[in-house]
Amino acid sequence: MTPGSTSPTETDAAADGVAPSRTSLVRRARTMNRTLHATYPDAACELDFDSPLQLLVATILSAQTTDKRVNLVTPILFGRYPDAAALAGADRAEMEEILKPTGFFRAKTESMLKLGAALVERYDGQVPGKLKELVTLPGVGRKTANVVLGNAFGVPGITVDTHFGRLVRRFGWTTETDPDKVEAEVGTLFPRKDWTQLSHNVIWHGRRRCHARNPACGACPLARWCPSYGEGPTDPAKAAKLVREPRG
């Protein structure tokens, strides 16, 4: 079926102001996720890391900047401060200079110093593998904790970043705006084992096609099922120009 063509699905019902049934919503959401996974078979965390600590630090540093920029900075950071104790004892001015390219470097330096100290004092310098412990660390909320759990520990979690929240509302999977509520509601639509990969699939789609402004609707593999189809250009040629290729 071509983008924009009609089908007797709950998408049509939504267009008529009729809420889809729970069963049809679950079926549609899972079909969309499978399609995303087929479209982005390599979808994974785009932060470079070799340990839970490196991923935790990189995720905190990724706030208000790009993963690409963080990946340029972290090899320098970890070369100078390879463990939690080194982070805790870092020279503030020196660390600020390293973190400048990530933006908000003073606040991020403060977070790194406090994070290192907390890990040393509470967890023997090791990153804990439980959500309830991770969220007590400086600079760590549920989003960051789920990134670390899912990608460094293999514990399923949904990462509600700005891309994920925007897309799941466009998809009609939730109307919630609070990240914790989004996480809880979307989580009921999928098996727990799928949560981490689901996050990657949706985030990759948000970065590559379903942009905040001018989504590439005419080049979207989800057009058939998306109730927001038409928010961006539907002409395939125009939409194709908006698609951003994955980093090399």
Image: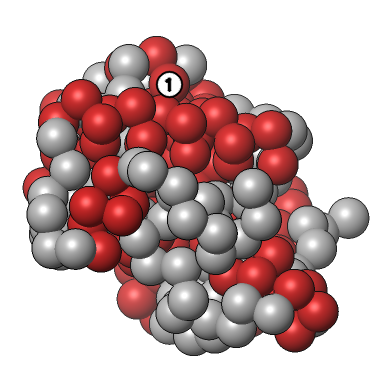
Residue 34 at what x, y percent from top left? 55, 29
Relative vertical location of residue 49 with respect to residue 11 in this rendering, above or below: above
Going by the image, does 145 lie left or right of 65? Answer: left
Tell me which residue sits at (59%, 41%) in the image.
36
Going by the image, does 180 lie left or right of 89? Answer: left
Residue type at mark 1? Asp
State whether residue 109 appears in this view: no
Quarter of the image for residue 8 reads top left
Furthest toward the right, the residue is 248
Quarter of the image for residue 20 reads top left
In what element is the residue under mark 1?
helix
- The C terminus - image quarter: bottom right
Residue 166 at what x, y percent from top left? 35, 65
Tell me which residue sits at (12%, 54%) in the image.
18
Relative vertical location of residue 164 with respect to residue 27 in this rendering, above or below: below
Tell me which residue sits at (65%, 70%) in the image.
218
The residue closer to the viewer here, 146 or 24, is 24
The residue closer to the viewer here, 91 or 198, is 198
The residue closer to the viewer here, 219 or 14, is 14
Residue 44 at what x, y percent from top left? 63, 38
Q: Residues within 10 Å of mark 1 (few under 14, many from 20)?
A: some
Residue 161 at what x, y percent from top left? 37, 57
User: Which residue bears the numbered disc 1?
Assistant: 194
State whether residue 173 appears in this view: yes
